[in-house]
Image (spheres, helix red, strand yellow):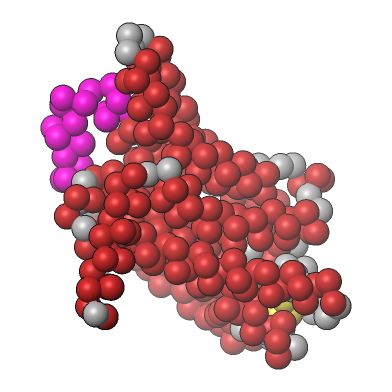
């Protein structure tokens, strides 16, 4: 066992040194960006900044309300607060660099910065996949086993699922970033994207990347399909339980409880599957940029809107917070 750990650690150290040597000899990359300097694109750029600001404020407010209001101290809302945290970090990783490049015209990014963007992007995307699966299990227990909810969805299990989501996402991000940045890159360092994304960067490599692309495809399929399968199982069981309910009011309440989560899952997985599970021959750079913008910029905005507007407890916590703020001012 010790020999195995020693060999793994020595391999990791050698890989790290190899990547650092490549970073030292590789010149900066050029991000071509999402917008041109035209009137229409300037309007879109301002709209993206507005959406980003609203997204960060909305998710920060959700995170604050959940941790401040005692009525929201339940596993369901704790998982929702982690989703808001992931969305805030994801937006902050991508948009500020894109905005600075557009405003200054300096579109370069160092190999180290590129590797960090890949790491954070893949970590947060993978972590969100597993977090959404944990949230679907929470809804399954709440609808199908409401009397046993404190036992089946204990705080200990909730914390384990949350830590597992962060850890699995970080492990995938570290592996993808290290493997991608270990390739030597050709003289053409122009990335036809607005941030460093592993599939786009691999196209610039001056080496045979077929094996890596195959392994990356398998990893993406597992990171997407395993949690998505768990989500489908959870909601299939929920649907079967709801259809057996005699009370129309109970069915309505159960559907209302789960509809918000279904909307978020559909938006997130639809975009992610389009990006990472299409055959290489069907990929177009412009399509990838638009879809990437959708689930890195627009989806984080929709999450707090969907959960807050359709949730009376969150709206009640917001009204309570506003009353407290008004009382402090007066």
- The x, y position of residue 310, in whole percent, is 43, 43
- The x, y position of residue 37, in whole percent, is 83, 80
Is residue 201 among what the camera can see? yes
State whether residue 10 is above or below residue 150: below
**Type of secondary structure dominating the magenta stretch:** helix
- The x, y position of residue 258, in whole percent, is 41, 33
Q: Residue at x 41, y 27 (%)?
A: 255
Q: Is residue 124 left or right of residue 163?
A: right
Q: Is residue 315 left or right of residue 213?
A: left
Q: Nearer the viewer, residue 251 or 300?
A: 251
Q: Nearer the viewer, residue 94 or 112?
A: 94
**Numbered range of the magenta stretch:** 140-161
Q: Residue at x 52, y 67 (%)?
A: 54
Is residue 6 among what the camera can see? no
Farthest-out residue, right = 38
Q: Nearer the viewer, residue 287 or 141?
A: 141
Q: Is residue 174 left or right of residue 9?
A: right
Asked if residue 155 lies in the magenta stretch, the reply is: yes
């Amino acid at each position: 066992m010790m020999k195995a750990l020693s060999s793994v650690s020595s391999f990791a150290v050698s890989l790290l040194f190899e990547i650092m040597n490549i970073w030292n000899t590789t010149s900066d990359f050029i991000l071509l960006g999402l917008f041109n300097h035209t009137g229409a694109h300037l309007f879109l750029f301002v709209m993206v900044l507005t959406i980003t600001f609203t997204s960060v404020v909305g998710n920060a407010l959700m995170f604050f309300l959940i941790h401040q209001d005692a009525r929201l101290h339940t596993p369901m809302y704790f998982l929702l607060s982690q989703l808001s945290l992931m969305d805030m970090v994801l937006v902050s990783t991508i948009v500020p660099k894109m905005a600075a490049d557009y405003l200054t015209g300096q579109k370069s990014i160092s190999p180290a910065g590129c590797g960090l963007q890949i790491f954070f992007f893949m970590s947060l995307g993978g972590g969100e996949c597993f977090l959404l699966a944990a949230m679907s299990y929470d809804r399954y227990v709440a609808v199908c086993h409401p009397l046993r909810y404190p036992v089946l969805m204990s705080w200990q299990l909730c914390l384990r699922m949350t830590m597992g989501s962060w850890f699995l996402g970080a492990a995938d991000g570290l592996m993808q970033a290290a493997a991608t940045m270990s390739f030597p890159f050709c003289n053409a360092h122009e990335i036809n994207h607005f941030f460093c994304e592993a599939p786009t960067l691999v196209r610039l490599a001056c080496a045979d990347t077929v094996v890596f692309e195959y392994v990356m495809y398998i990893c993406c399929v597992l990171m997407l399909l395993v949690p998505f399968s768990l989500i489908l199982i959870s909601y299939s069981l929920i649907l079967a339980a709801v259809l057996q309910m005699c009370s129309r009011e109970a069915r309505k309440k159960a559907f209302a409880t789960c509809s918000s989560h279904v909307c978020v899952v559909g938006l997130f997985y639809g975009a992610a599957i389009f990006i990472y599970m299409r055959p290489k021959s069907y990929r177009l750079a412009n399509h990838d940029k638009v879809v990437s913008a959708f689930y890195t910029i627009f989806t984080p905005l929709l999450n707090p809107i969907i959960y807050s507007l359709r949730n009376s407890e969150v709206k009640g916590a917001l009204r309570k917070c506003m009353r407290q703020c008004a009382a402090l001012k007066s």
